[in-house]
Amino acid sequence: MQFEFGRFQFLSAEGRNFGTGPSYFSSKYIFRRFRSIRRGFFCYCRMLLPIYLSLTVLVLSAGQVSGFAYEIRLIGGAENYGRVEVFHNGSWATVCGEGRTMRMDNAHVVCRQLGFRYALGWRKEAFNCSATYRRIFIRFLCVGTETSLDQCRPRFERCEHCGKDIGLVCYIPGIANEIRLTGGAENYGRVELFHDGSWATVCDNVWSMDDAKVVCRQLGFGYALGVKINGFYGPATNRGILDRVDCVGNETSLDQCRLRFGRCEDFEEDVGVVCNSNEIRLAGGADNYGRVEVYHNGQWGTVCDDLWDIHDANVVCRQLGFDYALASKTGAFYGQGTGSIMLDDVSCVGNETSLSQCRHLGFEVHNCGHREDAGVVCKKFTTEAE
C-alpha cells in the first residue's frame, strides 16, 4: 500500500492496482465528517428536548399535590382560618405542635402557600382532635420568606397524644378583617381593628356577647367567655372608629355584621372581649369556676393542690381573662380529673401572667393523685354593655 498526502492507493497481493480515491486520513474529509455528525447530533437533541422536558415535569411532580410537595388546607372554620391539615404520605393529617412549630415565621409561610398575604396567628387547640385523620407533628425549618412548606425542609413525626389540633388564622383584606386584642393577653384584651392604615378601637355602644362571639371566632378561638366595657383594658393610642356593631352571633368575621362607622367620645367607651384560653381551662363547673386543667405536650392534665392558695388562683383567673379569684379549692372539690397531673407544688407570687411562670416541680413531676386536684372560683364577667 502506498500513501500520499490527501490520496491513497490500493494494491492487490499480486501488485494489481484497484484504483485511487479520497483518503479517510484526509484532514479536510475528517473535518467535514465531524461537522456533519455534529449537525445531526444537535438536530437529534432538539427533537428529543420537548420529550425530555415533559418527562422531567412528570417526574418532579410525582407525589406532589396541586404543585406543592405538601398540600395544606384549613378546615372547620372559614376561608382564612381553621384547623390545619396537611396531605402527607397519601392521606390528610391534622397537626399538633408546640414551641418552634408555633413560630410566626412558620405561620406566614403556610398562609402564603394558601394564597394569603401573611398570618395573623396560630391557634393552639382551637379544634377538637379529629378521629378521622392521622395526627402529625411538624418540625418546621422556615426562615419566613419561603412561599411554600416544602421549601422549609419539614420533618414529620407522629403525635402521641390526641388533645386538640392546632388552627391558623390568615389575613385577607377587608373593612374589619384584621383585628387584634391588646392590653391583655393572647385570648383577652381591647378589641382593635386595622382601618385606613392604622389601628382603631371599637365603641361599646350596644356591644353584646353576640359581637364578642364573632370577634373570638374571627381570631380563631373556639368561643367567647365574656365582654369588657368602659375601657377596661386601658386607653388606646387611637380613638374608636366603629360606634355600633350589630352581629347575630353566627358570623365568621365582623365584616359580615352590620357596622356603623363613627368616632367614640373617649377611650372609656373602648370595648374588650375574653375568648377561651388555649393553655388552661376550668372543668367540672362553669365558665368562672371549676377544676384547673393545663394543656401540655398534646394533652390536658390537672394541677395538684399541694401549696395551692389564693395567689395561685388569682393567676389562673387572670390568665383566663377574669378580674381576680374569689376562692381557691382543694381536694378535688369539682370532681377528679383524668389523665396526667401536670403541675405540683405550684407557688405563685400573684403577679404572673400564666400559671407556668410560677414556681413548680416541673411538668408531669408530682407525688399526687387525682383526689388532690385543685380548683378555683373566679369573679364573673360583665356579659352585656350597659
Image: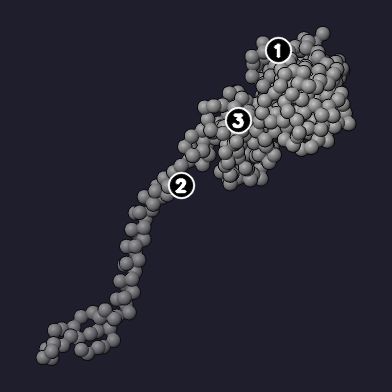
- Would residue 71 appear left or right of 267 to someone viewing this image? left
Circle 2 residue: 60
- Rate crowding at label 2 as few (under 14), some (14 to 19) or many (20 or more) other CA atoms within 10 Å: few
Circle 1 residue: 210
> Is there any visible trace of residue 359 in the rendered image?
yes
Which colour assignment does the render follow? one colour
Q: Which numbered disc, 2 or 3, marks the residue closer to the eye?
A: 3
Return the x and y of residue 281 as percentages of the image width and height.
73, 23
Amino acid of disc 3: Cys
Circle 3 residue: 162
Q: Earlier in the sequence, mark 2 or mark 3?
A: 2
Judging from the image, what secondary structure is the residue with disc 2 in? helix
Judging from the image, what secondary structure is the residue with disc 1 in? helix
Amino acid of disc 1: Asp
Q: Is residue 123 above or below residue 262?
A: below
Amino acid of disc 2: Leu
Disc 3 from disc 1: Cα separation: 31 Å
Do labels 1 and 2 touch, CB within 8 Å? no
Return the x and y of residue 69 as percentages of the image width and height.
51, 42
Return the x and y of residue 113 as percentages of the image width and height.
58, 37
- Rate crowding at label 3 as few (under 14), some (14 to 19) or many (20 or more) other CA atoms within 10 Å: some
Do labels 3 and 1 touch, CB within 8 Å? no
Disc 2 from disc 3: Cα separation: 35 Å
Residue at 59% across / 34% down in the picture? 95
Residue at 29% across / 81% down in the picture? 25
